[in-house]
Image: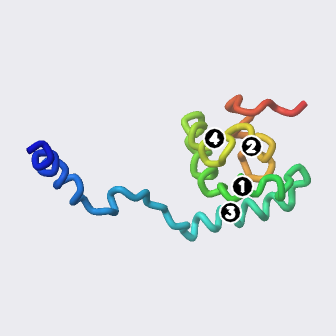
């Protein structure tokens, strides 16, 4: 008897569409690709940017660039864009336009002296 009542309770849950249980991935948009291309172009012109060491951060440029205009409210967004948070983003700040100023003005990364 217990089995039939458990099955009765689980049946509606088990019949949910599979798509609800799977994470969705957002495809890259043209703007995202443009942001990444701009970061690569900016990084290649900046001698303080090591594109090989910062490939992961540069690949997250679209996410980072979207958070910068939010000001201090964008700090969690910027730090969440790349694995490693501030530890990976701070050394790579020179690779993305406006990122270094954003991070130092919001006291996320120490200013180089």
Numbered badge on residue 79: 4
Q: Earlier in the sequence, mark 3 or mark 1?
A: 3
Work out which residue is located at the far left of the displayed protein and give it: 1
| Residue 48 position within the rendered picture, expressed as x and y whole percent measured from the top left | 89, 49
Find out whether the residues at labels 3 and 1 contact each other: C-beta distance under 8 Å.
Answer: no
Q: Quadrant of the N terminus?
A: top left
Res. 45 image quadrant: bottom right
**Could you say whether the residue bearing mark 4 is in a helix, strand or loop?**
helix
- Residue sitting at x 67%, y 40%: 85
Q: Position of residue 102 (x, y in %)?
A: 69, 39
Q: Are marks 1 and 4 in contact (CB under 8 Å)?
A: no
Front residue of 44/10: it is 10
**Disc 3 vs disc 4: Cβ atoms closer than 8 Å?**
no
Q: Which residue is mark 2?
A: 88
The first of marks 3 and 4 along the sequence is 3
SS under mark 1: helix
Give the residue pinned by disc 1: 56
Q: Residues within 10 Å of mark 1 (few under 14, many from 20)?
A: some
Q: Nearer the viewer, mark 3 or mark 4?
A: 4
Q: How far apart in space, not on screen, are marks 4 and 2 (Cα)?
A: 9 Å
Q: Is residue 69 above or below residue 105?
A: below
CA–CA distance in space, label 1 to label 4: 13 Å
Residue at image point 65% right, 55% down: 60
Check disc 3: other Cα within 10 Å, few if <14, some if 14-19, many if 20+.
Answer: many
CA separation in Å, label 3 and label 2: 17 Å
């Amino acid at each position: 008897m217990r089995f039939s009542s458990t099955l009765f309770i689980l049946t509606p849950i088990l019949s949910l569409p599979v798509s609800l249980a799977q994470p969705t991935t957002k495809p890259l948009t043209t703007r995202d690709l443009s942001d990444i291309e701009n970061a690569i172009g900016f990084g290649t012109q900046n001698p303080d940017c090591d594109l090989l060491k910062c490939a992961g951060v540069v690949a997250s440029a679209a996410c980072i660039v979207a958070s910068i205009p939010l000001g201090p409210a964008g700090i969690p967004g910027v730090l969440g864009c790349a694995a490693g948070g501030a530890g990976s983003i701070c050394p790579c700040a020179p690779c993305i336009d406006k990122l270094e100023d954003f991070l130092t003005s919001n006291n996320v990364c120490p200013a180089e002296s």
